[in-house]
């Protein structure tokens, strides 16, 4: 935990890849096109219509610069060979995962075809070759593939509801190893998500968790005592 916090969370090095992440965002913020979004999740607290400007999605719904850099550092620190992202959106977080370990195989899931089409164009523009994009309903996908997968890092940023979050958690439990790291986004987004986070923390297979307020990190190392940390990043 000490190494993770000091060498990863509080790493002040200015990585060259941070500029790529900023440029990725700038290109989206300059995109004046609109798309029709199919929202399978808990809905948006910002948008009242499903017709949304790409630049506004990037501005309000996408991962922040600070969080993208942290996600890059976490991926760079753990160097996971296989990564799963649940909820691509415009690919801002996907870009951080891709840059964090260029040798990783990254699978990213998105329910909305139009949103994913924008992300895939961005991946091509920035020459990210280690990303496989899948248009799918998350639970259906996880039910069919979890037995054959070895995801060392999973970033949960899809359906921000208690029911869906716990469903993904339980579907993916058979894939865990001692080195597995899971990151849940928006754990304090609603009372339902607060409840889901508490259930996850208390699960007998979970040993260590970190609450960064925005994210909840989950570890499964059997040799570590059960502990819960709150760390502001």
Image: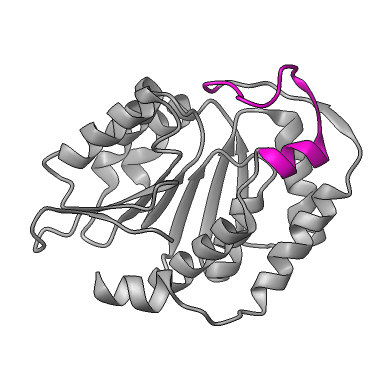
Q: Nearer the viewer, residue 108 or 42?
A: 42
Residue 178 falls in image quadrant: bottom left
User: For the point 45% across and 39% down, which residue is it?
Assistant: 186
Residue most toward the right?
Answer: 32
In depth, the one of 198 and 149 nearer the eye is 198
Residue reaching furthest to the top: 49
Magenta-span inclusion, residue 51: yes
Q: Is residue 30 left or right of residue 220?
A: right
Residue 150 image offset from top left, x and y in percent: 35, 53
Q: Is residue 95 left or right of residue 220?
A: right
Quadrant, the C terminus: bottom left
Magenta span: 41-60
Residue 64 magenta-drawn? no
Q: Is residue 182 left or right of residue 64?
A: left
What residue is at 39 percent from the left and 58 percent from the top? 232
> How many discs appear?
0
| Residue 181 percent location from the top left of the image | 33, 56
Report if residue 174 is visible in the image: yes
Residue 123 position by quadrant: bottom right
Does residue 213 sit above or below 140 in this rendering?
Answer: below
Query: In this rendering, is residue 22 above or below 207?
Result: below
Residue 174's image quarter?
A: top left
Of residues 145 and 190, which is closer to you in this image?
A: 190
Residue 210 vs 79, above or below: the answer is above
Depicted 179 relative to depicted 119: above or below: below
Residue lying farthest bottom? Answer: 13
């Amino acid at each position: 935990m000490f190494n993770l916090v000091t060498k990863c969370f509080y790493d002040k090095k200015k990585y060259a890849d941070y500029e790529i992440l900023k440029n990725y965002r700038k290109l989206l913020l300059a995109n004046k096109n609109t798309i029709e979004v199919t929202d399978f999740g808990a809905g948006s607290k910002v948008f009242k219509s499903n017709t949304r400007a790409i630049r506004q999605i990037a501005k309000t719904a996408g991962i922040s610069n600070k969080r993208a850099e942290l996600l890059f550092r976490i991926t760079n620190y753990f160097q996971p060979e296989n990564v799963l992202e649940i909820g691509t959106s415009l690919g801002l977080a996907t870009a951080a995962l891709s840059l964090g370990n260029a040798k990783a195989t990254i699978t990213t899931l998105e329910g909305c075809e139009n949103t994913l089409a924008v992300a895939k164009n961005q991946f091509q523009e920035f020459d990210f070759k280690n990303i496989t994009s899948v248009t799918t309903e998350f639970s259906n996908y996880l039910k069919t593939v979890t037995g054959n997968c070895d995801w060392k890092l999973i970033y949960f940023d899809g359906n921000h509801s208690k029911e869906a979050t716990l469903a993904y958690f339980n579907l993916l439990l058979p894939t865990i190893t001692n080195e597995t790291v899971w990151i849940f986004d928006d754990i304090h987004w609603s009372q339902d998500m607060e409840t889901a986070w508490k259930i996850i923390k208390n699960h007998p297979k979970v040993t260590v968790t970190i609450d960064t307020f925005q994210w909840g990190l989950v570890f499964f190392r059997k040799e570590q005592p059960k502990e819960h940390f709150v760390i502001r990043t």
